[in-house]
């Protein structure tokens, strides 16, 4: 590739990025693009309210691993810098429904895996990070709420209250990506542990397994009338009780983690 320069800046890919992007393009052309029709036919046959996983996805995941195209999003896992990985991410955008997931680089799992890598305890990593890295489960990030402008996390109202060796969670979340898929086995939930504290120390993040009593997936929200495979859902937490060891980092660290 001929380097492109702007005032002495070299935008050519590194040798490492050239290798990975070349192999990624081969995978896209040989396997991913041809699989798109199969994927959409499977979902069309069942109706878009069915959030099951087309089998071709697991086939492609196995192929990606065999080609060394797995967990490319993190420098400790794949050896790519953020700049080098950006070239791979751009390529996956040519098949956005399939490609990111089949190389285990789909949202919100990448952000959740990075959070667990940085702030998870050994127990949390064993229980949740390892199966996420292996592509065995998926995850959700529950911050956005229906009653407040929660893109500014200072406004969230979900409560996380310490009760002995547990935390009790109450509140509502919505547009929680991935939660319609039964493979989404754990949520990182952001709520308030100290509503009267300093604005950026009120929030905490805590791990809530999907099957925890009191956690209800109320409905799956369509986007422009369409339901995608993984879904975007409304969640209700009613006296949801989880062990205190499920807290990420410490109380008040939610904004710092985000």
Image (spheres, rainbow, N blue to C red):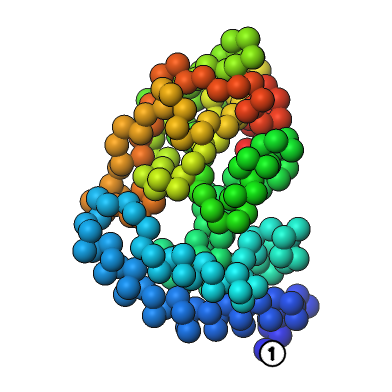
Split into 4 quadrants, where in the image is the N terminus? bottom right
Is disc 1 placed on a helix, strand or loop? loop
Split into 4 quadrants, where in the image is the C terminus? top right
Q: In the image, is 95 to the left or to the right of 84? A: left
- For the point 29% across and 36% down, which residue is it? 219
Q: Residue furthest right?
A: 8
Q: Taking 37 as reference, is 179 above or below it?
A: above
Q: Nearer the viewer, residue 158 or 210?
A: 210
Q: Can residue 31 be seen here?
A: yes
Residue 240 image position (x, y, % from top left): 47, 21
Residue 58 image position (x, y, % from top left): 46, 65
How many callouts does the rendering have? 1
Q: Residues within 10 Å of mark 1 (few under 14, many from 20)?
A: few
Q: Taking 161 as reference, is 145 above or below it?
A: below
Q: Quadrant of residue 25?
A: bottom right
Q: Quadrant of residue 207?
A: top right
Q: Nearer the viewer, residue 7 or 11?
A: 11
- For the point 60% across and 56% down, which residue is it? 134
Q: Nearer the viewer, residue 252 or 214?
A: 214
Q: Which residue is mark 1?
A: 2
Q: In the image, is 57 to the left or to the right of 108? A: left
- For the point 32% across and 51% down, which residue is it? 51
Q: In the image, is 243 to the left or to the right of 94? A: right
Residue 249 image position (x, y, % from top left): 71, 30
Q: Taking 8 as reference, is 44 above or below it?
A: above
Q: Can residue 200 be seen here?
A: no
């Amino acid at each position: 590739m001929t380097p492109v320069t702007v005032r002495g800046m070299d935008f050519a890919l590194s040798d490492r990025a050239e290798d990975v992007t070349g192999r990624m393009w081969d995978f896209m052309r040989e396997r991913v693009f041809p699989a798109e029709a199969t994927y959409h036919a499977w979902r069309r046959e069942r109706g878009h309210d069915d959030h099951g996983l087309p089998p071709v996805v697991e086939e492609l995941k196995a192929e990606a691993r065999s080609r060394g195209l797995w967990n490319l999003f993190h420098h400790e896992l794949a050896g790519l810098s953020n700049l080098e990985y950006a070239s791979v991410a751009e390529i996956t955008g040519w098949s956005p429904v399939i490609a990111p997931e089949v190389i285990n680089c789909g949202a919100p799992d990448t952000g959740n895996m990075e959070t667990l890598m940085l702030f998870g305890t050994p127990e949390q990593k064993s229980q949740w990070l390892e199966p996420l890295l292996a592509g065995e489960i998926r995850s959700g990030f529950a911050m956005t709420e229906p009653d407040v402008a929660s893109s500014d996390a200072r406004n969230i109202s979900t409560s996380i209250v310490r009760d002995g060796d547990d935390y009790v969670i109450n509140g509502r979340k919505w547009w929680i990506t991935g939660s319609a898929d039964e493979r989404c086995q754990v949520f990182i939930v952001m709520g308030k542990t100290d509503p009267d504290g300093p604005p950026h120390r009120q929030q905490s993040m805590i791990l809530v397994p999907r099957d925890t009593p009191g956690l209800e997936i109320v409905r799956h929200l369509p986007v422009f009338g369409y339901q995608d495979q993984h879904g975007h859902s409304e969640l209700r937490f009613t006296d949801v009780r989880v062990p205190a060891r499920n807290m990420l980092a410490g109380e008040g660290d939610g904004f710092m983690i985000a």
